[in-house]
């Protein structure tokens, strides 16, 4: 939740359906950032 708030504290959309879409977009963006920042581990042995 803290990461979601870091993008913006308030919703821009007023309609309930648009608010839902806005949250889905923010979460997809956070997941993308997390995937880009995650280190790739390779087993050696």
Image (cartoon, rainbow, N blue to C red):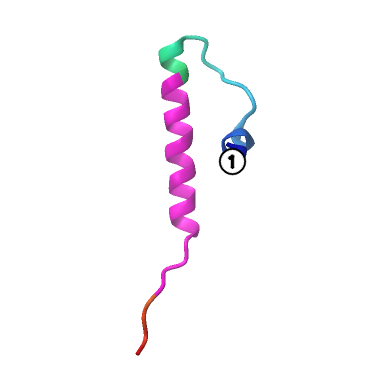
35 to 24, vertically: above or below = below
Question: Residue 16 at what x, y percent from top left?
Answer: 45, 12
Question: Residue 7 at what x, y percent from top left?
Answer: 60, 35
Furthest residue toward bottom: 45
Magenta span main SS: helix
For the image, the number of numbered tags is: 1
Image quarter of residue 6: top right
Q: Residue at x 43, y 47 (%)?
A: 32
Image quarter of residue 44: bottom left
29 to 18, vertically: above or below = below
**Element under disc 1:** helix
Q: Residue at x 62, y 33 (%)?
A: 5
**Position of 1 compared to 35: left or right?**
right
| Residue 36 belongs to magenta span | yes
Q: Quadrant of the C terminus?
A: bottom left
Q: Residues within 10 Å of mark 1 (few under 14, many from 20)?
A: few
Furthest residue toward top: 15
**Position of 39 compared to 9: left or right?**
left
**Position of 2 compared to 28: left or right?**
right
Q: Report the residue marked by disc 1.
A: 3
| Residue 43 belongs to magenta span | no
The stretch in magenta equals: 20-41
**Position of 10 compared to 23: left or right?**
right
Q: Residue at x 42, y 39 (%)?
A: 28
Q: Residue at x 50, y 58 (%)?
A: 37
33 to 9, vertically: above or below = below
Q: Quadrant of the N terminus?
A: top right
């Amino acid at each position: 939740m803290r990461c979601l708030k870091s993008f913006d504290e308030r919703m821009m959309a007023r309609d309930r359906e648009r608010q839902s879409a806005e949250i889905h977009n923010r979460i997809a963006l956070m997941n993308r950032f997390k995937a880009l920042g995650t280190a790739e581990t390779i087993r050696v042995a």
